[in-house]
Image: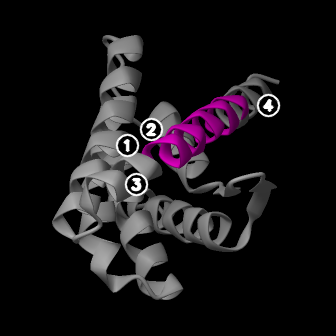
Amino acid sequence: MRNSKTRKLSLLAVLIALTVVLGRFVMVPTPTGFLTLLDAGIYFTSFYLGAKQGAVVGGLSGFLIDLIAGYPQWMFHSLIAHGAQGFFAGWTYNRWLGLLLGSVAMLGWYFLGSLMLGYGLSGALASVWGNVMQNCFGLLMGYLTFKTIKRLENK
């Protein structure tokens, strides 16, 4: 595989597939539900490869998970929310601002998506805490994975 574009596309396909599997089938139980590793895959990709690749992995992974899980009404909302999350998290010129904007974009879009899908204001507000926890868990796990991979590359 000498073609650089083919190599990059293959890497993105593997990261999307891995993120879908981790996001759909690895669930950490909590008192209020469960957390998945979807956001960890998005943050890892954003840190490791950058904004564009983070947006692709984030958007397509969220889209595919909703399709597989039987939530087609959320597919396009996840595409936008997690795509924006991955894009902003991959900013390198101001990492903190990018993480803040990525988190706010994901949380805000899911809040608006809940309203658009008819869950009402109380339903939209009720989903905020779970999304905050999901985002924080994913950020921590994605960052730790990124630092581990970078450390292994330097050896």
Q: Is residue 120 left or right of residue 35?
A: left
- Whichever of callouts 3 and 1 sits on the residue coming sooner in the sequence is 3
Q: Is residue 116 left or right of residue 74?
A: left
Between marks 4 and 2 in the image, the one whose residue lies nearer the viewer: 2
Name the disc covering residue 42, or none.
Answer: none
Tags 4 and 3 touching, CB below 8 Å:
no
Q: CA distance from mark 1 to mark 4?
A: 23 Å
Q: Which residue is mark 4?
A: 152
Element under disc 4? helix
* Residue occupying image coordinates x 40% and y 15%: 95
Task: Assess disc 3: are there few (<14), some (14-19) or many (≥20) residues with their C-alpha within 10 Å of its C-alpha.
Answer: many
Find the residue positioned furthest to the front: 122
Q: CA distance from mark 4 to mark 3?
A: 24 Å
Residue 4 in sight here: no
Quarter of the figure that contains the C terminus? top right
Name the disc covering residue 46, or none.
Answer: 2
Q: Which residue is mark 3?
A: 58
Residue nearer the viewer, 12 or 109: 109
- Whichever of callouts 1 and 4 sits on the residue coming sooner in the sequence is 1
Tags 3 and 1 touching, CB below 8 Å:
yes
Amino acid type shown at disc 4: Leu
Task: Assess disc 2: are there few (<14), some (14-19) or many (≥20) residues with their C-alpha within 10 Å of its C-alpha.
Answer: many
Tags 1 and 2 touching, CB below 8 Å:
yes
- Whichever of callouts 1 and 2 sits on the residue coming sooner in the sequence is 2
Tags 4 and 2 touching, CB below 8 Å:
no
Magenta stretch: residue 92 in it?
no
Q: Which residue is mark 1?
A: 86
